[in-house]
Image (spheres, helix red, strand yellow):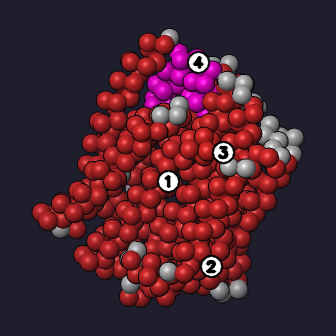
Amino acid sequence: MANVSSQDLGNEPIGKLLIRQAVPASIGILVMSLNILVDTIFVGNWIGSTAIAAINVVLPVSFFIAALGMAIGIGGSSMISRALGANNTIKALKTFGNQLTLTLLFTVTFAVFGLYFVDTLIPAFGGKGNIFEPAKVYYEIILYGVPILGFVMMGNNVIRAEGKPKFAMYAMLIPSVGNLVLDYIFINVLGYGMAGAAWATTGSYVVAFLFIFWYFLSDNSELKINFSHFKLQKAIVSEIASLGFVTLARQAVVSVTFLLVNNALFNFGGETSVTAYAIVGRMMMFVLFPVFGITQGFIPIAGFNYGAEKYERVKESIYTAIKYATILGTIVFIGLMFFPEIITKWFTSDPDVIRITPNNMRWAFAAVPILALQLIGAAYFQAVGKALPALLLTLTRQAIFFIPLMYILPVYFGELGIWIAFPISDVLSTLVTGYFLKREINKTLVDKI
């Protein structure tokens, strides 16, 4: 597969270009998600089902801190794509330098904060009873590597903004494969248990960081910065913050959602229900990889062409991305509706978990075929630098609809109410996003063509 340069983003046919951008992104997400999936299977079979719940408790904290790097990466990458499209190389370089400085400052600060309040945060995120001790072991080790993960997430998005999807894919493949190898060594061979699982994950972050560091020093990258670019500039930081806040808010809501759902399910069904949610959450990361891949491939195409004022190509990229992602989402939906029992048994042999998880999984994924419109629509506004609508549409799915529904519906349906809140919130957020995206296309893109 030929690599794509930044200028090709404005010239190649949209369908061909989207495939070139999305396939490496999808492969990278697939392997990363497969890594999380297999890691969970290893932990469940080699340590126990309680260990799965323990890792799920830690995820909100580590995800949030890693999301700082992702937010800075995506916010700055939108700027870099548009700057490259407008042939403004100086702005692209200054943006990248500011991204590096911001990532260092924020990820280290929050990692220190997270370690200091470890005994408060773990119970708050559902780490109670037998879950607390293994969660604490995993949490403390993971947080040592989270700042490194922040740089990895930031750098990966910048690589994609340069139009280098293959290298972005490699940056996701290398740590994923490394983590599985280290899992086997630390857990199965050396018998380090939860500590082994945590050190395997942290070690994989280091490997990914070294690869990305090499990439930006090599001739593959167009962004050759010097020390002057590291100096924070108010205008650049402000734009990175406004666009990156969309991603940060989304990840923060994911963390809050984990917290709330873990606690709500613990109150209904104890550790068994929390474990079921952990399995469903892993599958959500894994099976939606092609939809997320198309979304990631779409962002630099839309951003570059918007910066180059090629609005017909922007419009075409929106419709093409939604079409491809909807087809793939429907295929995922069919598989999950028919085989949830088999999937559950990959993770655990616990009969109680196997009994309750399949139907819950069906409910959680019931609206997957229409989810593409919501994801692409919110991503479009972020790609073209429109932070406020991107933020609002990003928050509709979980913050505006899901969280209220997960409190209201259990009053009438018990634990089932938490699970049916997933598809209802997906449908409502898709309708809202579809309305605003259609209005944007008619009033902004069509008028400028």
Residue drawn at x 80%, y 37% is 222
Which amino acid type is marked by label 1? Leu
In three-dimensional space, the C-alpha distance between marks 3 and 1, rounded to whole angstroms, equals 20 Å
Judge by depth and name the residue closer to the eye, 186 or 81.
Answer: 81
Q: Is residue 390 above or below residue 54?
A: above
Does the magenta run of residues contain 316? yes
Q: Which secondary structure lies at badge 4?
A: loop
In three-dimensional space, the C-alpha distance between marks 2 and 4, rounded to whole angstroms, equals 47 Å
Marks counted in the figure total: 4
Judge by depth and name the residue closer to the eye, 204 or 384.
Answer: 384
Q: Which secondary structure lies at badge 1?
A: helix
239 horizontally vs 334: left or right: right
Residue drawn at x 70%, y 86% is 190
Q: Earlier in the sequence, mark 3 or mark 4?
A: 3
Which amino acid type is marked by label 4? Glu
Label 2 sits on residue: 141
Residue 26 placed where, x, y %?
59, 44
Q: Which mark is residue 248?
A: 1
Q: Residues within 10 Å of mark 4 (few under 14, many from 20)?
A: some
